Image (tube, rainbow, N blue to C red):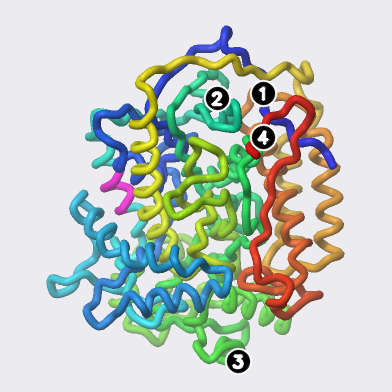
């Protein structure tokens, strides 16, 4: 197997500028900004994001944030719904903690200026697949993430101890004696800076761009997963990529998410003959958990030999539909569709990376002085299938815990800063003799075919061989180009994901093996964990 290099690019501390901070937060989505807000105001914080703050996956979230906000709802019910969706791989203690903190975290967002939707003076609560009650707070109808991020960005920018670097690519974490000491950051393209930090929090989001069909923004290229993996951190549950059942499928359109809330409000899923099919697959119909709905849609597409299915809202009140889903109505209108009358063509797409960097209840990773929160992490909340609208909630809760934990840990350290004699030698001179975009597009298509909604031993084995071949020449070169670094990160994590999917010889949650269609609790009711193999001269945590 091709050795994964410790550092993607060459650097030497005598040839680069240095920056020092108490807490470094990599990622400017909801988890990252919530972590920044949790750091003691007497400490310095640097938030680094590779694009503009508004380009995180958090800003693209449509449905909302799940929380027990109705007196008729109960924490126990939200816990039960989460575990029913995620199965035995959920950590009940983590689920209890997150669910019980939800009202407080939502109240903070309101305090910070988030304008959630109201009706008659009370929060409007929606219901989505897998939920037994209406408990999802939302904003702007179907643009919750956009409104939440607007408010949180404005709040964070007012904090004098927080500095934000936008358009700054984190190339690698810096490690010494088994601990993280900061990161190598490229600002404005290729100008590198060594950022030294007492504590580092990883909040880089997901990996949806590994797939041809995805709801994720362009920034979701598995960077944080790869950073942590190269630094020696444990990755867990990497076979569990959640595929959202309903992604807009129109030639010429981006793969826009069609929120689960649209089914929560009564939309039907029908095939190309106009036949409602979900009750044939699950008694909960359109409100079954996402893994069940996505797999049912793929099965129905096979039966009808049609490339998609359709969402039908024509039986709902048109005024309500337009008011509740203005964003979706606006997108569909560009393609000549009136969602109150016309059926919306949809099919599944990669949506949420359940697996990630292993963390405990405080957000600690297996590498000393490194924390993680949000989609980049594997906390035990989601199990084998994430319950709708628990993702922003997880980012809020673990962002709070990781920020507080990193702040407290930094406060116990001596108030002194120094650069360490870390360096990475030059490996290959000259530009690579291949096209980044071509390899990237080929990888995305391969992952969609072999590691998509349905997987099999033969497809995964062939994919593993192809990815290994690409790694031989793509990982062998050092580049000074964010596009190249993204591709290298994507290949590193695609290889782990395919390996995990091959090893798990059963079907569980979002992981469907056609050659092993049933769950096998005796052998596979456990987590699969991965760490990078050390090369000569490497130092990895014990």
Q: Residue at x 44, y 55 (%)?
A: 361
Residue 346 visible in rendering: no
**Left or right of residue 470: residue 380:** left
Q: Which mark is residue 9?
A: 1
- Measure how far apart labels 1 and 4 are at the Cα level: 18 Å
User: What residue span does the magenta drawing correspond to?
Assistant: 147-152
Q: Residues within 10 Å of mark 3 (few under 14, many from 20)?
A: few
Q: Residue at x 51, y 19 (%)?
A: 193
Seen in the picture, residue 134 relative to 423 is either above or below; the reply is below
- On the image, the x and y values in percent for residue 375 come to 50, 53
Name the residue beneath numbered marker 4. Answer: 540
Q: Earlier in the sequence, mark 3 or mark 1?
A: 1
Q: Quadrant of the C terminus?
A: top right
Name the residue beneath numbered marker 3. Answer: 280
Q: Residues within 10 Å of mark 1 (few under 14, many from 20)?
A: many
Name the residue beneath numbered marker 2. Answer: 184
SS at mark 3 in the image: helix
SS at mark 2 in the image: strand
Q: Earlier in the sequence, mark 1 or mark 4?
A: 1
């Amino acid at each position: 197997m091709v050795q994964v290099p410790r550092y993607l690019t060459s650097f030497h501390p005598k040839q680069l500028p240095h920056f020092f901070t108490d807490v470094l937060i990599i990622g400017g989505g909801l988890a990252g900004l919530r972590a920044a807000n949790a750091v003691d105001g007497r400490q310095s914080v640097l938030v680094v994001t590779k694009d503009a703050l508004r380009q995180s996956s958090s800003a693209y979230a449509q449905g909302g944030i799940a929380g027990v906000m109705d007196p008729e709802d109960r924490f126990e019910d939200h816990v039960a719904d989460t575990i029913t969706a995620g199965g035995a791989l959920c950590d009940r203690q983590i689920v209890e903690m997150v669910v019980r903190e939800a009202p407080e975290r939502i109240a903070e967002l309101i305090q910070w200026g988030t304008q959630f939707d109201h009706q008659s003076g009370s929060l409007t609560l929606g219901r989505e697949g897998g939920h037994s009650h209406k408990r999802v707070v939302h904003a702007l109808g179907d643009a919750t993430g956009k409104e939440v991020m607007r408010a949180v960005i404005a709040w964070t920018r007012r904090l004098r101890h927080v500095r934000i670097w936008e358009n700054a690519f984190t190339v690698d974490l810096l490690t010494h004696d088994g601990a993280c000491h900061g990161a190598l950051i490229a600002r404005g393209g290729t100008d590198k800076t060594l950022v030294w930090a007492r504590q580092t929090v990883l909040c880089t989001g997901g990996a949806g761009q590994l797939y041809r069909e995805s709801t994720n923004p362009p920034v979701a290229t598995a960077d944080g997963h790869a950073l942590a993996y190269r630094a020696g951190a444990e990755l867990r549950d990497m076979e569990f990529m959640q595929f959202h059942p309903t992604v807009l499928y129109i030639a010429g359109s981006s793969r826009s998410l069609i929120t689960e809330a649209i089914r929560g409000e009564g939309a039907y899923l029908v095939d190309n003959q106009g036949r409602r099919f979900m009750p044939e697959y699950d008694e909960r119909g359109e409100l079954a958990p996402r893994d069940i709905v996505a797999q049912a849609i793929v099965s129905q597409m096979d039966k009808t030999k049609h490339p998609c299915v359709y969402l039908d809202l024509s039986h709902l009140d048109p005024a309500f539909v337009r008011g509740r889903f203005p964003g979706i109505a606006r997108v569909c209108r560009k393609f000549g569709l009136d969602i109150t009358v016309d059926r919306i063509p949809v099919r599944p797409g990669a949506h949420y990376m359940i697996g990630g960097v292993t963390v405990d209840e405080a957000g600690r990773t297996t590498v000393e002085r490194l924390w993680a929160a949000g989609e980049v992490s594997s906390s035990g909340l989601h199990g084998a299938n994430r319950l709708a609208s628990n993702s922003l909630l997880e980012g809020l809760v673990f962002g709070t815990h990781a920020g507080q934990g990193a702040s407290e840990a930094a406060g116990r350290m001596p108030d002194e800063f120094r650069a360490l004699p870390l360096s990475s030698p030059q490996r290959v001179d000259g530009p690579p003799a291949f096209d980044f975009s071509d390899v990237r597009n080929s990888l995305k298509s391969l992952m969609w075919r072999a590691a998509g909604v349905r997987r099999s031993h033969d497809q995964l084995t062939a994919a593993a061989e192809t990815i290994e071949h690409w790694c031989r020449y793509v990982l062998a070169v050092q580049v000074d180009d964010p596009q190249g670094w993204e591709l290298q990160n994507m290949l590193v994590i695609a290889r782990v994901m395919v390996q995990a999917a091959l090893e798990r010889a059963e079907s569980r949650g979002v992981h469907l093996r056609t050659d092993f269609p049933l769950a096998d609790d005796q052998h596979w009711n456990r987590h699969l964990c991965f760490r990078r193999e050390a090369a000569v001269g490497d130092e990895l945590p014990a």
